[in-house]
Image: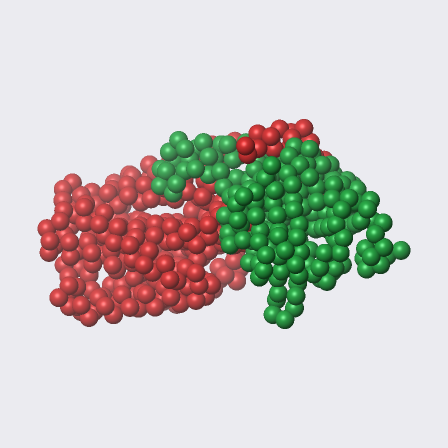
Amino acid sequence: MTVLTAQAVSKHFGGVTALDDVSLDLRPGEVHGLIGPNGSGKTTLLNLLSGYYPVDDGSIKLGEIDLTKARVQQRAVLGIARTFQKPRLLATLSVLDNAMLGCYPSTQAGFFETAFALPRARRDYISARNRSLDILHGVGLGHIINRPASLLDHAEQRFLEIARGLAMKPTFILLDEPAGGLTEAEIEALGRIVLTLRDNGVGVLIVEHHTDFVFRISDRVTTLNLGRMLKHGAPAEVRRDPEVIRVYLGA
Amino acid sequence: MTNSRFRLFATALAAVAAVALPFFVADQYQLHLATLIAVYWILVAGLNLVVGFSGQLSIGHVGLLAIGSYAFTILASQHGVDTFSATVVAGAIGATCGFLLGLPSLRLPGFYFAMATLAFALIVGELSLAQQELTGGGAGLAVPGFPAPFDTPAGFYWLVLAIAALVTGATANITRSMWGRALVAVRDSEVAARANGVPVFRMKLLVFMFSGFTAGVSGALFASLQTYITPETFTFELGLFFFVAIIIGGRGSILGPFLGTVLLTALPEVVAPLARLGNFFYGALLLIVVLAVPEGIGPLINTLRERFRPTKVEKQLVSPDLRRLETAINAGQRV
């Protein structure tokens, strides 16, 4: 089993310590919730895992592969997908084209093969299109595949980012506040998608403020505070922890 | 489906009209103009992948055009290379120069990259003036023509047209493919591009080299069409002209920049008073487009349609089809 691990990672921004000696392991077929107050380092940890920032200390590993120095696009090709707190879609392209961008790592045809529309380029295109269509219908965007991304509402943007990530055939998908700004019904749909991913072997990391949602769907939960690990364990356990209640959940 | 059939029909009609053009033109000058448009378009089509699709603002492609022209002329007239091989070599030299220019400059953010290409164009201009024994300096060089059957105006026009069609087809294939989506991602969100495994810098460099190749080929044909080249032929305004043709045409479109090229080349010639305005005309047109239709004239049709008959955006709750999702995930599972 391939595990994505952050081993004793630290990150400083100037004089500010964003993360201090934090470890986390993400397993395939598991939902891992990451919660904590604002500025506790949740998104920083996600950015270290996906490669947006280099770690100052510690290491990142995917199974036996050392990713500590690997660049973002290398990690993407190795099967680590992510979404963003503020969705980063290509506004002028359609929903389908946006999802198809996620199939880029599976593209085989080179530039000149593509320029002359050789068979391999055609195959790339068709398989990307079919896969994207399946995933878009799967996450519930099948009715708007031709709509430009600029016309999507907030929830549709979030679901499209997840679809784009899934098009990459990821082993792990890291979701940065996926429930932010969604209605109860949409969160419910999101939860069902996440559980389907888990049941089919994808490892999901959820960075989220909506703690009820996290506790409901996570298999394990990690709580951060001020860049340090506060508590780690099963949802029920973390929820009862007096420290977690004091600094984050409240009475 | 009707849309794509209409497209096919329109393309076929335009192709027939383009091929039959020499039989309809009133005088040789109009044919010369049509050939010039096709020559410019060969460069602009390649540049369009750089500017319109991957969003790198190169204003110095006139430098690559000049290199292609001089390479072709020197090879064909002084070294006895046949004109077709010289054209291909001019393209290869253009691609090499594109590589050498892009390697240090494509990592720069937009504005600084534009400045680097500007500096490149200026340097090429000065060098072509200074290297007298190679380029003839200010006196310039006579350019050999292509052999029969391409030695008549119509024959040369058809040759250029065929090359232009080939280049257009290649760029259309690129933009419609997975590469096209990756290029737009490089333009609109490098962060999203990287997150999806797109090697951003390599992507930029590759299309820049491709545009160098088309600029070199275009330069060879341009020189042959002009029959005589001097450093004066390659003014900086020409570099700006290519760039403006794409901006006026609209980013992310092939038809738009093509219309831009036609418009900018033909309009001042057809409407005589505009010719007297010279650069003022380009400036005014650019200003109008940037202020009134910043998306360019290419997407204008869609914008207008949207205004008169807006697409109804109905709110529909996202309802996942989990079984289909499951199938898709399992189909893509890594072993």
Chain in green, by letter, is A
Q: Can you give x and y, in whole percent of width and height, for residue A8 in the image?
A: 63, 55
Closer-to-camera residue (B199/A124):
B199
Closer-to-camera residue (B84/B242):
B84
Q: Is residue A90 left or right of residue B161?
A: right
Closer-to-camera residue (B148/B72):
B72
Chain in red, by letter, is B
Q: In this view, does B105 lie to the left or right of B34?
A: right
Count of residue discs: 0
The quadrant where residue B270 appears: bottom left
Q: Which quarter shows the N terminus of chain A?
A: top right
Q: Which quarter shows the C terminus of chain A?
A: bottom right
Query: At x 14% / y 59%, what residue is drawn?
Result: B142
Query: At x 37% / y 62%, what residue is drawn?
Result: B104
Query: At x 26% / y 67%, what residue is drawn?
Result: B125
Closer-to-camera residue (B129/A240):
A240
Query: At x 66% / y 66%, what residue is drawn?
Result: A17
Q: Residue furthest right?
A: A251
The quadrant where residue B66 appears: bottom left
Visible in this render: residue B219? no
